[in-house]
Image (spheres, helix red, strand yellow):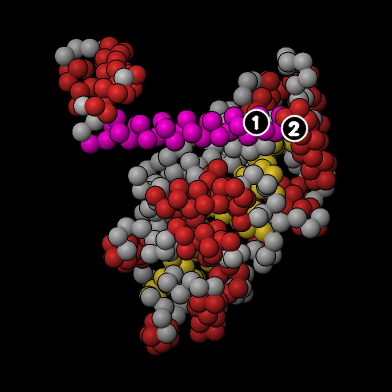
Amino acid sequence: MTDRKIRVLVGKPGLDGHDRGAKTVATVLRDHGMEVIYTGLHQTPEMIAEVAAQEDVDVVGLSILSGAHMELFPRVRAELEQRGLGEVMLVGGGIIPPEDAAALEAQGYARLFGPGTPTEEIAEWIKARMGERLAAEGGGA
Amino acid sequence: MSSAADIVERLRAGERVAVARLISWAENGDARFAEALGSVFEDVGRGRRTGITGPPGAGKSTLTNELTGLQRAAGRTVGILAVDPSSPFSGGALLGDRIRMEERTSDPGVFIRSMASRGSHGGLARAAIDACDVMDAFGYEELLVETVGVGQAEFDVMEAVDTVVVVLCPGAGDGIQAMKAGLLEVADVLVVNKADVAGAERLLTDLEDAVALRRRAEGAWEPPVVACSAGRGEGVEGVWEAVEHHRRWLAEDGRLRARRARLRIAQVRGAVAEGLAARLWGSGGLTERARSLLEEGGTPYDVAADLLSAVSARVVEPEEVSGS
């Protein structure tokens, strides 16, 4: 009897103090049947990766509105890899110019969602991608 | 895909991600969990298990965080399981207890796992004891289990831990609430949190009266009532002293052994009930027979009696079943 849920960490790295968007996305993901761990504000990349490890999440979603995304996203990625969590799907959102989004996606971020993305689209995208991954693993992880 | 043997090896090597993965397997009903548990079960039982329960907003996470701080100051490692409710509609959950324990994230002597209650309605999750067993096998010395915010009838925690701490706070009902059956009876330690808030003294007195009025068997444990303000870090030592006091009592006359044996029996009964329910009501199960009997005009109890006799005939005559 298996009961596999998608587990997602929603985190706010760095110094910006606005988490309304992160909370909105967290709520929408919950309403799509996911188990969402919300870390709160002002997280370092180390803290986010450590929480991802302890919580065994499938997806890490970062919200950054401060403009420090080119600095913070790669550091989170590196911290995850250092813990053997290179498989974890990374997504992000916030005020990220398209050229930066393209650069980050090229570095291994699965997907960056810009301002104005309908929240439903984010949830559906994660579900579809995780569905493919779980099917490839035969339903387990 | 990793095998159970791989993960057990990594657990023994001290890799925290192995703890996390094993807990996920337990939650997901992955068959590899039982195999892995079998390999490490001899290492389970050294950790001391304390449950923290109480209504929403009473301060369970804050108290858990403060108690963790005390343990760390004393040099003991801590494994925390924090359970939050799953949505009955979407099946999803928002797990936010970590926020109040954020300062522990960078401490290698603390492991925190958030868990959604999924189908359970008793204040814990089906895999809560499994998660404790995994953290215990890894070597965490103090295991703290925080339940969902409970009302008056969620008592699973009493069959999951050595010591149950019930956290209440002023402003959530009068003395009659405190005297009702239920939450008070499962408490080994009663905590009045937010002791700096108006009404705390009254609640303390009400609880002391309720404890004093309860009939209890000769030599039974009388739960102490302790006040604290976890958010200010005040009085938390007193809470832990009460837990330690209960432990000393448990250590006498084989009480701890008896309590843990009762816990495991409850766990076996739960697992059997779950397995039976899946077989009985799964595809090709009894649902169709129940439906047709109901359509013939039977009462729910007639139908249940019919199904029970059909099932128990097989249970009490196993040879016939295996021979058929």
Q: Position of residue B281 (x, y in %)?
A: 28, 31
Residue B250 circle label: 2
Q: Is B283 displayed left or right of B102 in the figure?
A: left
Q: Residue at x 66, y 24 (%)?
A: B185
Mark toward the start of the polypeptide (1 vs 2): 2
Q: Residue at x 30, y 60 (%)?
A: A138
Q: Where does the magenta region start and end? A: B255-283
Residue B108 circle label: none
- Say above or below: B302 vs B14: above
**Which quarter of the image is occupied by the N terminus of chain B?**
bottom left
Magenta run includes residue A125: no
Q: Chain of mark 1?
A: B
> Do marks 1 and 2 both belong to one polypeptide chain?
yes
SS assignment at label 2: helix
Amino acid type, label 2: Leu
Residue B259 circle label: 1
Amino acid type, label 1: Arg
